[in-house]
Image (cartoon, coloured by chain):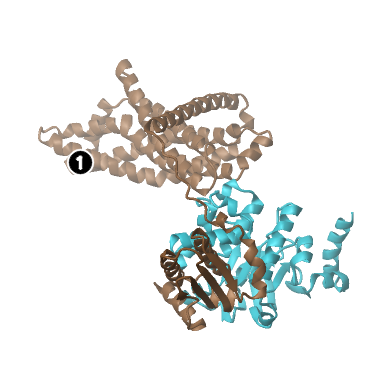
């Protein structure tokens, strides 16, 4: 609002007359008078007004021999926008087969008149956006999906071979990157993982206790919650937080490097971006995910213990109940799952980063895709794991 | 042009710039006349680009004033500052075009914000500006689809969107081949001659400076100030200052080789 005020006062204080005005002499001749400073501000409003008058005049009966004169003798300064206005009026004349001429234009602006010729090129026909049929859309979507799957398979292959390489050439792995990634993804994630794990522990126990109380089975809440946390909730909470924090970070980081041609520089320098960028991050993911999961388990179970105090279950009862329900196998199963989550999260983040297109927006898209794909993969891995557990009893 | 030559577009008074306690350049005094092509030159790291950013108000100077068409940009705030900001256009070193928009939208963006023109009018205006820099056929291209030289020209078209009187260009010819660079010089001179723009250009490309500059100031890192001022060819031939001599000479010998 403030801006429009400024601009209107600008035009009014520089010149009282409008920048352009329409003078109709008769049905076959008319005149447009430009005056003062003709620029993008002084033209707003009068541009539309003059063009409407012109169109009305052109539509009048005598169609042949209509001549419009552009009088520029009162112009104090003419900007690029002034020429655009002039061209707009001229184009309308040309379209109607009428005549157009300019008088009184200062000599210094004359060269610019030819600058824009032919003016028809300034009025391109609107390009009709090709409509895609449903079949084509479905086909393209399927192709994208297939390409994505193929990309994932080839990336998995590359990653496996490079991880194997890193075991054989352990000194050549970039351990500096590994450490800084592990610190960023691991130690810096401790507060948020702790907070979420604690709250989940509290909520899980309370929800379970409300139901169990009706059957007088409150004492079973502890073992139940602990088992759920160790086998499922701990790994899952950690994985989802890692996906949100680190997978997105990897994608954005590698994506920015891709946009800035840094990845190209690695390739042309004979360094494999897989070994240089992906391997340290995936190794960090493998290290960090189970440790964070163990931490989340401990915090969550502690939260559950504290919550159960409200139901008069002392720590010692909780502990012994938990020991009978949860064994090392359960913890191990949770940690193995967490390790797989770690691989998936960091690998998907890196993959999406490497697939980044051009420009700043592409980095954002990659980060989003990294989080979404990571979570889908987490659920997928979890499902497969649940099936294996069911079949083998592990 | 002669009638407007008398007035001053930019007046710099006792300007000191730097970061925190680190002073880059101190006590600068110079002025840019209307319609002039004014070039700031100097070796790398002497504060050319920083000076430019202080001139158009992106950075706040440590001391002193910058008057743009008589209005002090260093002290202006709010709507007043906004008004000064729209009276000039800026081309950043890498073009800084908005990557998510095509060239036409890059140019119309500022018009959408500051004018009440209709969509077809804005499009026509933007096409004229693109035509002035020779990019009319590329209006629907994305910035990533055109070359570096074209990006810089598109950035000039965007800088001209609101019909400013002054254009600030940060290293327009850096990283361009001689032909593209000469094309860009041609565009700058045409705009200056035909539309009366005042240009303030940061550059260290001597070939370009000789062909376009009406006036140069030369900055020096050690002196933390201006060590030479005037017509570049006159400076080349007559300056007694060894630093100025060396700056021009080094390039000269390279050109002769």
Q: List x then y, in percent, for residue B196.
A: 65, 72
Q: Which residue is mark 1?
A: A206
Give the quadrant of the N terminus of chain A.
bottom left
Q: Is residue A381 visible?
A: yes
* Helix, strand or loop status at disc 1: helix
Q: Which of A18/B175 is in front?
A: A18
**What residue is rendered at 59% in x and 65% in y?**
B90
Q: Is residue B94 visible?
A: no
Q: List x then y, in percent, for residue B40.
A: 71, 68
Q: Which of A327/B21 is in front?
A: B21
Q: Is residue A261 above or below residue B192?
A: above
Q: Is residue A192 above or below residue A175?
A: below
**What residue is rendered at 10% in x and 32% in y?**
A215
Choose top left, top right, bottom left or bottom right for residue B1: bottom right
Chain label for disc 1: A
10 Å crowding of disc 1: few (<14), some (14-19), many (20+): some
Q: Which chain is brown?
A: A
Q: Is residue A204 above or below residue A106?
A: above
Give the quadrant of the C terminus of chain A.
top left
Side (left or right) of B39 relative to A168: right
Choose top left, top right, bottom left or bottom right for residue A179: top right
The hue used for chain B is cyan
Q: Which of A66/B217 is in front?
A: A66
Side (left or right) of A234 relative to B11: left
**What residue is rendered at 35% in x and 31% in y?**
A379
Q: Which of B159/B79 is in front?
A: B159
């Amino acid at each position: 609002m403030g801006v429009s005020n400024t601009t209107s006062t600008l035009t009014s204080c520089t010149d009282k007359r409008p920048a352009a005005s329409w003078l109709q002499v008769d049905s076959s001749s008319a005149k447009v008078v430009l005056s003062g400073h003709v620029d993008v501000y002084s033209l707003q409003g009068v541009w539309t007004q003059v063009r409407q008058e012109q169109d009305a005049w052109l539509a009048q009966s005598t169609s042949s021999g209509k001549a419009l004169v552009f009088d520029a003798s009162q112009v104090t300064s003419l900007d690029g926008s002034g020429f655009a206005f002039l061209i707009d009026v001229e184009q309308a004349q040309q379209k109607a087969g009428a005549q157009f001429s300019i008088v009184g234009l200062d000599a210094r602006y004359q060269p610019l008149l030819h600058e824009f010729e032919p003016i028809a090129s300034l009025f391109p026909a609107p390009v009709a956006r090709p409509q895609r049929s449903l079949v084509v859309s479905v086909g393209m979507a399927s192709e994208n999906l297939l390409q994505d799957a193929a990309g994932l398979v080839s990336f998995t292959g590359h990653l496996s071979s490079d991880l194997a390489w890193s075991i054989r050439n352990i000194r050549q792995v970039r351990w500096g990157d590994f450490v800084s990634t592990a610190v960023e993804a691991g130690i810096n994630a401790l507060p948020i993982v702790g907070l979420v794990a604690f709250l989940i522990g509290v909520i899980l126990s309370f929800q379970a206790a409300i139901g169990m109380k009706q059957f007088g089975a409150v004492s079973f809440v502890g073992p139940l919650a602990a088992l759920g946390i160790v086998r499922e909730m701990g790994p899952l909470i950690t994985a989802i937080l890692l996906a949100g924090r680190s997978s997105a970070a990897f994608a954005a980081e590698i994506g920015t490097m891709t946009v800035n041609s840094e990845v190209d520089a690695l390739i042309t320098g004979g360094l494999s971006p897989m070994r240089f960028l992906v391997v340290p991050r995936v190794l960090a993911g493998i290290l960090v995910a189970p440790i964070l999961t163990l931490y989340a388990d401990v915090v969550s179970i502690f939260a559950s213990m504290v919550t159960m105090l409200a139901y008069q279950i002392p720590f010692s009862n909780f502990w012994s109940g938990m020991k009978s329900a949860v064994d090392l196998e359960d913890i191990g199963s949770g940690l193995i799952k967490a390790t797989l989550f770690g691989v998936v999260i960091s690998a998907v983040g890196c993959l999406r980063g490497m697939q980044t297109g051009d420009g700043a927006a592409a980095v954002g898209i990659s980060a989003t895709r990294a989080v979404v794909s990571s979570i889908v993969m987490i659920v997928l891995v979890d499902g497969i794991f649940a099936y294996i557990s069911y079949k083998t009893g592990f | 042009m002669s009638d407007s030559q008398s007035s001053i577009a930019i007046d710099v008074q006792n300007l000191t710039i730097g970061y925190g306690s680190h002073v880059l350049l101190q006590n600068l005094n110079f002025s840019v006349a209307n319609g002039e092509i004014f070039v700031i030159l100097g070796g790398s790291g002497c504060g050319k680009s920083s000076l430019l950013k202080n001139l158009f108000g992106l950075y706040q100077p440590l001391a002193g004033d910058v008057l743009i068409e008589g209005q002090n940009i260093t002290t202006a705030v709010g709507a007043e500052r906004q008004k000064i900001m729209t009276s000039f256009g800026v081309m950043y070193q890498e073009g800084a075009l908005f990557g998510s928009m095509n060239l036409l939208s890059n140019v119309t963006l500022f018009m959408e914000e500051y004018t009440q023109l209709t969509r077809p009018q804005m499009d026509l205006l933007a096409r004229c500006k693109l035509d002035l820099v020779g990019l009319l056929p590329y209006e629907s291209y994305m910035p990533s689809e055109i070359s570096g030289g074209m990006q810089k020209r598109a950035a000039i078209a965007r800088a001209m969107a609101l019909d400013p009187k002054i254009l600030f260009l940060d290293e327009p010819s850096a990283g361009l081949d001689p032909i593209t660079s000469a094309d860009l010089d041609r565009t700058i001179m045409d705009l200056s001659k035909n539309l009366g723009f005042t240009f303030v250009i940061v550059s260290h490309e001597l070939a370009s400076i000789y062909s376009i500059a009406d006036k140069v100031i030369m900055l020096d890192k050690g002196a933390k100030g201006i060590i030479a001022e005037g017509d570049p060819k006159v400076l080349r031939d007559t300056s007694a200052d060894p630093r100025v001599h060396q700056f021009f000479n080094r390039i000269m010998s390279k050109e002769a080789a």
